[in-house]
Image (spheres, rainbow, N blue to C red):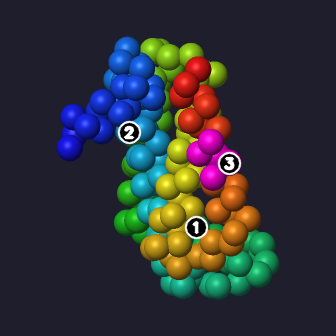
Amino acid sequence: MNSVLGGILSVVVGAGKMKNFLLIVFSVVLGVGGQLALKYGVGMASSQSSSRIVQSLDPKSMISFFQSAASNKFVILGFALYLISALSWLIILSRVDLSFAYPLISIGYIIIVVLSRLIFNEPVTSYRIAGTVLVCAGVFLLLRS
């Protein structure tokens, strides 16, 4: 199964770019994991601190919210995943053109739309699906260049 997937990716991406592509995917997946962990942790922090943070930006509520968020293990995990993603991004930038690598971050948009629906039960409208399909088409075209 892995050799089949690798073969397909080699055709789409090109054999020479495979390692770079996989490193980009690794970085993007870490970023997605970070985003999901932050969202989950912030949801917990919001319920633990004053929920007025959502309704107003009063300084006392914000301080309470940030204190609660800073000590939340999912928020800490989210930032750790972002740090690892950023470090891997430095390697990517040393190996590939920025004009190739940066648009591939949009793969994360696709993953986030799907996982936000599955994990957080967020609404995914037909417009969001259409936008995601357009992103997929753009990423495919970029990979062919």
Tag in front: 1 or 3: 3
Residue beneath disc 1: 66
Residue type, mark 3 in image: Leu
From the viewer's perspective, is 45 left or right of 3?
A: right
126 or 64, which lies in front? 126
143 or 117, which lies in front? 143
Query: Which mark sits nearer the N-terminus, 3 or 2?
Result: 2
Residue beneath disc 3: 134
Q: Main secondary structure of the magenta part?
A: helix
Residue type, mark 1 in image: Phe
- Taking the spot 46% from the left edge, 73% from the top edge, the residue there is 118
- Taking the spot 53% from the left edge, 72% from the top edge, the residue there is 117
Residue beneath disc 2: 26
Magenta region: 133-137
**Are there few (<14), some (14-19), or many (20+) residues within 10 Å of tag 3?**
few
Rendered location of residue 57, percent (x, y)? 78, 72
Disc number at residue 2?
Answer: none
Tag in front: 3 or 2: 3
Rendered location of residue 104, percent (x, y)? 55, 35
Rendered location of residue 27, percent (x, y)? 43, 38
> Element at badge 3?
helix
Marks 3 and 2, Cα distance to the nearest angstrom?
A: 22 Å
Could you say which quadrant of the image residue 142 lies in?
Answer: top right
